[in-house]
Amino acid sequence: MKNVILAAVVMTLATGLTSAEDKAKKKSESKKKEGWVQLFNGKNLDGWIPKVRYHKAGENFGNTFRVEDGVMKVGYDKYDEFGQRFGHIFFNESFSHYRLRVEYRFTGEQAKGGPGWAFRNSGIMVHGQTADSMGKDQDFPASIEVQLLGGDGKNDRTTGNLCTPYTHVEMDDKLLKRHCTKAKSETFHGDQWVTSEVEVRGNDLIRHIINGETVLEYRKPQLDDSTDIGKALAEKNGGVQLSKGTISLQSESHPCEFRKVEILVLKK
């Protein structure tokens, strides 16, 4: 009798494992069918271009961006102090209509000399200018930023916010000129992984999604031609409206990690 019961238990466990494996396999196959493409290969920075303030595009000052244990890390262990060296790492293609999914988390202590507002702060920049079009002294690319923030362990601090370096957007049919707008998200304390997704539909709609929940949306991303950088890019672009651009990830003085960066190109 004991042998019969043991065999039944083993069979039940095996069936459960097989079922879980089948579900995981089906989920993976479903994602492949959807057309998701990994922009970060988990091995190196192939396809990505670093641009750190005061340095030319392609120069990875202080090994700011590196790959360790299959994760893209942003670190400052080779910096004496941050020194306003804001950095970005650009994927080497531009996109117009797509969904971008990024898994991120904050780790460790902020770099010495980092500004207070940059504590546990990073971002995903979309509809951006190219790395080589940035000035050597330029702090941020003209772009639309999906701001990524971590909590301090006590206070509320939303993530998936909007910031607009050298740009504007329209919200509720009005031109929005303030630099940052809060999203309706929860606060994520500690070093937990968070999934940030941005849906970009050319010049029409941009939507921020955190862990599957839509937290912000707006329309008509455009250059701010009241700034020298925005004006120069608008002249080159043939107008202020933005319908495509680069994707980049930020370095703003707090160590962070990205373990997945994937894109699903959408039909226009």
Image (cartoon, helix red, strand yellow):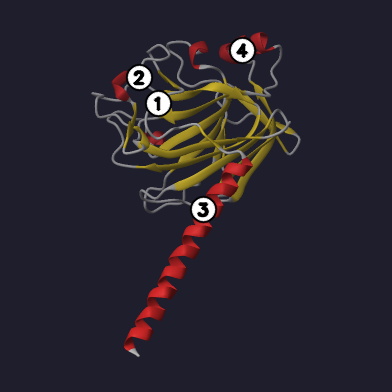
The residue singled out by tag 4 in the image is 233
Label located before the other in sequence (1 or 3):
3
Residue 3 x %, y % = 33, 84
Nearer the camera: disc 4 or disc 2: 2
- The type of residue carrying mark 2 is Asn
Labelled pair 2, 1 in contact (Cβ < 8 Å): yes
- The type of residue carrying mark 3 is Lys
Give the Cα distance between marks 1 and 3: 28 Å
Query: In the image, is 232 to the left or to the right of 42?
Result: right
Labelled pair 1, 3 in contact (Cβ < 8 Å): no
The residue singled out by tag 1 in the image is 45
Q: Residue at x 32, y 21 (%)?
A: 83
Label located before the other in sequence (2 or 3):
3
Dot 4: element: helix
- Which residue occupies the extreme bottom position in the image? 1
Q: Residue at x 50, y 64 (%)?
A: 19
Q: Residue at x 41, y 72 (%)?
A: 13
- Which residue occupies the extreme right position in the image? 173
Q: Quadrant of residue 145?
A: top right
- The type of residue carrying mark 1 is Leu
The residue singled out by tag 3 in the image is 25
Residue 232 x %, y % = 61, 9
Label located before the other in sequence (4 or 3):
3
Viewer-closest of 67 and 149? 67
Give the Cα distance between marks 4 and 2: 25 Å
The residue singled out by tag 2 in the image is 60
Q: Is residue 159 visible?
A: no
Query: In the image, is 85 to the left or to the right of 186?
Result: left
Nearer the camera: disc 2 or disc 3: 3
Dot 1: element: loop
Residue 47 x %, y % = 46, 23
Label located before the other in sequence (2 or 1):
1
